[in-house]
Image (cartoon, rainbow, N blue to C red):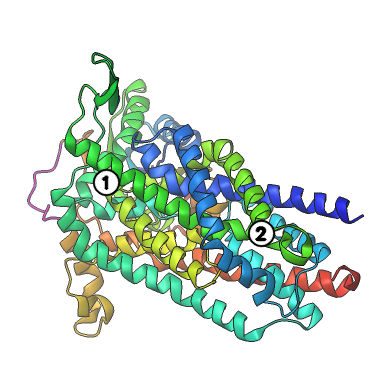
Amino acid sequence: MLSSILVPMDDSEPAGHALKYALENHPDAEVTVLHVVGAPSMMMGDAVGLTLEDDISEAAAERAEPVFDRAREIADDLDRGIETIVSVGHPARNVLDRADDYDTIVIGAHGSDRSRASHRFLVGNVAETVSKRSSVPVTIVR
Amino acid sequence: MVETLLLIGIVASVFVGVNIGGSSTGITWGPSVGAGIVKKTTAAAVMTVFVFLGGITVGQNVMETLSEGIITTDLTLAAGVAVLFFIGLGILVANIFGVPVPTSMTTVGAIAGLGLATGTLNYVTMAEIITWWIVTPIIGFWVGGVIGRYLYPAVNQRVDIKKSEGPLLILDRQGTVPTPAFGPNTTWRELGTTTVVLIIGCYMAFSAGASNVPNAAAPLVGEAGLEVTNAVIIATIAIGIGGFTIARRTMDSVGGELSDIPLLAALFVMVTASSITTALSYIGIPISLVMATVMTIVGIGWGRATRPITFREAVSRDSEGEDREIELGAIVTEEQKDEPTPPIGEAETEEVLHGSDLFNPQAVIKYVSMWIIGPSMSTILAYGFFVLVPGVT
């Protein structure tokens, strides 16, 4: 019986599928959605933009809002509640750092807009890295 | 035969120019277009003009280095065309894999490969160029760091760049002679900031011309067959075409990435990167505008992220060094511990968001590695080619 599930999400389609899968297959588990902002990118624009803000946590929360809105919509459709966490920096590392607090991780197979080679080169495939190094079982959803 | 070869060379040069135009227009105008201050078409048009000015003035020094500085003999037409193909190859790789391959460095690499193969490489010039390639990112990083740490916060409090509804200026046709007047919501302040944004964009376009026009033009100049002016004009037209076509996309993506940082910060970055690029081009060193830009951005972010700790601590983590990493993040995020927990289902901000997490050196190192791999690959490929096909030189 899994009682707590971590679902790392971005604005990609597989991320939505992952959340839906987690909610449908674990009706009694507490689902936490994690979104990581300020990931390294080609020109570091997002990360630098974030550091220039006066209040990093507030700015990070603001950037995460669209992803959480979508997550809540998915959860509402299934009549479920979710918890949300915002984090900054390297996506895979953030997920792995929190893995121990949960029974399992459910993650989308790949990210969205920045899934180009350049992004893979800098960040790697998050789902792949997480599944390789995670201390808890990982489900990858397409 | 010679004419056919020259034609092939011009086609290759145009290909290189169009791609350069796409990427450099992206970084130069992306932020202002993103902020709604300049239209994409205006940006491309202004870009073309200042690229030409940069190419025909300061760019000539770089062209000299490329065509007669790196190798002791003059580039022949055939060799120039071959070099252009290697530059094109680098661009192709960059486009297909989305990895940033700096064009200026690929160009130098290809010519150096030719020099190695024919035993005409000017090692003194190469050593000078490579030294600048190592020093420049460091300069960019430190200037960015100083701006992010000391200058930006102070200026940010005083300056507010924004665009109001409606056109900036309108023509007042009520008098006998139409005179320009302010648009419905325009203020003196907006007019001032818009002008500054435009001027800085032009400056960066100038430096883009100085550093990038030679890549497309130099291989065809001199003994190869074209007059300097003609080669610059061809390169400018090609860059302009790139600015009006490919740049529509890159202004969103490459420039969009830049637009993720506030416009004011982007302007600081642009001024710094353009000044570095123009200065180096002036002394004839081929340098990548993107390289200077990226390192300045990283520097600004780093400077800002480390602001709450003192300079000495940021550089040397000697005194009580172990706790530094944690404190850095803890200071950047304001105290949040005592805030009440939001109800379940609401967004819950995580206790500590580490500002330092945004700067994992690994990503920067990977990025910088492309500046080593790119030119090295082009040197090796060009060397192999010119050794196997000695007739070309």
| Furthest residue toward top | B174
- Under tag 2, what secondary structure? helix
| Picture quadrant where residue B179 is located | top left
Kind of residue sitting beneath label 2 = Val
B358 and B236: which is toward the camera: B236
Kind of residue sitting beneath label 1 = Ala
> Tag 2: Cα neighbours inside 10 Å, few (<14), some, or many (≥20)?
some
Q: Quadrant of the N terminus of chain A?
A: top left
A72 and B327: which is toward the camera: B327
User: Which residue is pictured at 28% across the width and 29% down the height?
Assistant: B168
Q: Is residue B223 magenta?
A: no
Question: Is there any visible trace of residue B74 in the rendered image?
Answer: yes
> Real-space Cα distance between discs 2 and 1?
51 Å
| Picture quadrant where residue B286 is located | bottom right
User: Which residue, given by chain and number where applicable, does mark 1 sit on?
Assistant: A60
B108 and A130: which is toward the camera: B108
Give x and y (percent) for residue B319: 19, 84
Looking at the image, is mark 2 or mark 1 nearer the viewer? 2
User: Which residue, given by chain and number where applicable, does mark 2 sit on?
Assistant: B228
> Tag 1: Cα neighbours inside 10 Å, few (<14), some, or many (≥20)?
many
Magenta span: chief secondary structure = loop
Magenta residues?
B334-342
- Under tag 1, what secondary structure? helix
User: Which residue is pictured at 22% across the width and 63% down the height?
Assistant: B329
Q: Quadrant of the C terminus of chain A?
A: top right
Question: Is there any visible trace of residue A136 in the rendered image?
Answer: no
Q: Chain of mark 2?
A: B
